[in-house]
Amino acid sequence: MAGVSSPAGLATHFLSCAESSLCEQIARDWNTKDKASDYAGFVTAFDVDADYLAQFEEHIVGGSQHRELWIPSEELDTFNQHIKGNIRLVARFYGEQYSG
């Protein structure tokens, strides 16, 4: 499972992507052009308890490879408790206006 989120305070959902290619596309093509994301996008990967994830409906956005679980932001503390093992940084992208 891979994840990408909007900047703190702006997201109503955490997007959990079944395919890391979708997360990479969001981080690279959207976040690097977004001032609220500080023109940077990051993709992480992690394992989550499957029984816990079963409560969230899968959404297809765009093509069939664009499968997401929308985790409500108020659910993130509980979601984090169900992460197994380490969170891994898979990719990072920086836009032209990034200044960090």
Image (cartoon, rainbow, N blue to C red):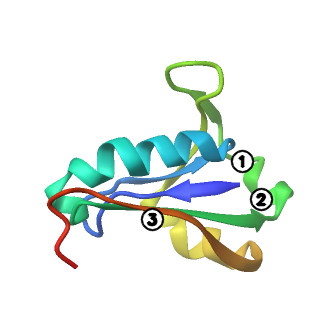
* Residue 52: image location, x then y, percent: 77, 59
Q: Which residue is mark 2?
A: 52
- Give the mark nearer the N terminus: 2 vs 3: 2
Q: Which residue is mark 3?
A: 74
Q: Residue at x 35, y 53 (%)?
A: 12
Please tell me whether residue 65 is drawn above or below residue 79 in the rendered image: above
Please tell me whether residue 11 is drawn above or below residue 87 in the rendered image: above
| Kind of element beneath mark 3 | helix
Residue 2's quadrant in the figure?
Answer: bottom right
Residue 71 got which mark? none
Q: Of all residues shown, which one is farthest toward the top?
A: 63
Q: Which residue is mark 1?
A: 55
Kind of residue at disc 3: Glu
| Kind of element beneath mark 1 | loop
Whether residues under marks 2 and 1 lie with C-beta atoms below 8 angstroms apart, the answer is yes
The mark tally for this picture is 3
